[in-house]
Amino acid sequence: MKSRGRDDAILQECLDRLGGGETVAQCLARYPDQAAELRPALETAWRLREEGAALGPDEGFRRRTRQRLLMAYAQREGHSKARWAWLSALSPRLVAVGAGLLLVMVLGLGSTYRAAAASVPGESLYWLKEKGEQVRLTLARSDKAQAHLNASLAEERAKEGRALLSKGHVQKLSKVEAQFRGHVQKTLKSAGVRPSGNPQPKVLPPAKRQQLRKELSEQLRQQAQRQAHEIQALLKNASPDMKPHLKRLQETLDVEYQGAVQALEEEQDGKDTPHR
């Protein structure tokens, strides 16, 4: 008990010292015996501090961030199992993402995370956006949750594609398009649709599976309409050298959205046609 309290106090002190201007290395040098355990949380805090400095997070944000890091550290060390029981229940799904960073993002990052959510590949806060999405996917436990979330992330990749082209970053489009396709495929997989002819396990009861496919086909259809509208608006004022890239993005979205909606609707009708 004393050891746990001392370790928590050390982490709290180090977070305070970081806030006062010390570096991670200086904090770790003060406590070499705890350095291995302290490093992940302190490096996360430092990076958040550096990335968010220009955005001016308020005192409430700083207080919440510190508390999240303390909670993550307690979970990592297996301290106070009763107090952190709900975290322990999630731990197998959280480990891959990194407990300290994960908990900070799951529970909110204020203005920093809002800015990250609007970022695109290549921008300084995009790493945080990616980690936040990993967290959401990790915590989406049901097939239905996974399907709807991947559908939403597919649209997010489509938005990023438009944003990249509007900024002239053509070289990053291929990666975003590939990620878009991946999310669409994962959406179908969670709904039990058979990609490439390989049967998927049908976990949901038939009635719920049919309802999910109906919801997803409508969600994807609406996304396709929104993205087509936005790309058409960009095309009106796009430069001649940018128009082919916008048309390519539109074609990619059309093919994937139409194929996914068709596959979902065919399986709603009881047909057994695999999605390519």
Image (spheres, rainbow, N blue to C red):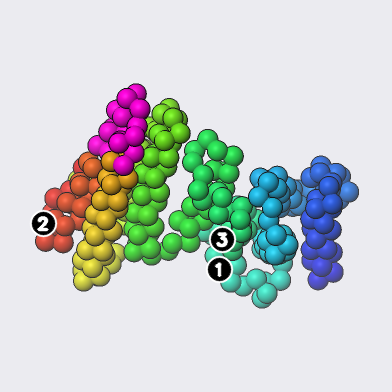
Q: Looking at this view, name the residue that lies furthest to the right.
A: 30
The image position of residue 118, as x and y in percent, is: 50, 48
Query: Residue 239 sits in which quadrant?
Result: top left
Q: What's the amino acid at mark 1?
A: Ala
Label 3 and label 1: CA atoms lie apart by 15 Å
Label 2 and label 3: CA atoms lie apart by 40 Å
Q: Which residue is mark 3?
A: 106
Report the residue at 36% width, 49% height from top.
Answer: 155
Instruction: Using the image, determine if residue 213 lies above or below residue 160.
Output: below
Q: Name the quarter where the C terminus is drawn.
A: top left
Q: Nearer the viewer, residue 58 or 186?
A: 58
Magenta extent: 233-252
**Which mark is first along the chain, 1 or 3?**
1
Q: Name the quarter where the N terminus is drawn.
A: bottom right
Q: Secondary structure at mark 3?
A: helix
Q: Residues within 10 Å of mark 2 (few under 14, many from 20)?
A: few
Q: Secondary structure at mark 1?
A: helix
The image position of residue 53, as x and y in percent, is: 70, 48
Residue 222 is a magenta residue: no
Q: Nearer the viewer, mark 1 or mark 2?
A: 2
Q: Is residue 32 among what the camera can see?
A: no
Q: Nearer the viewer, mark 2 or mark 3?
A: 3
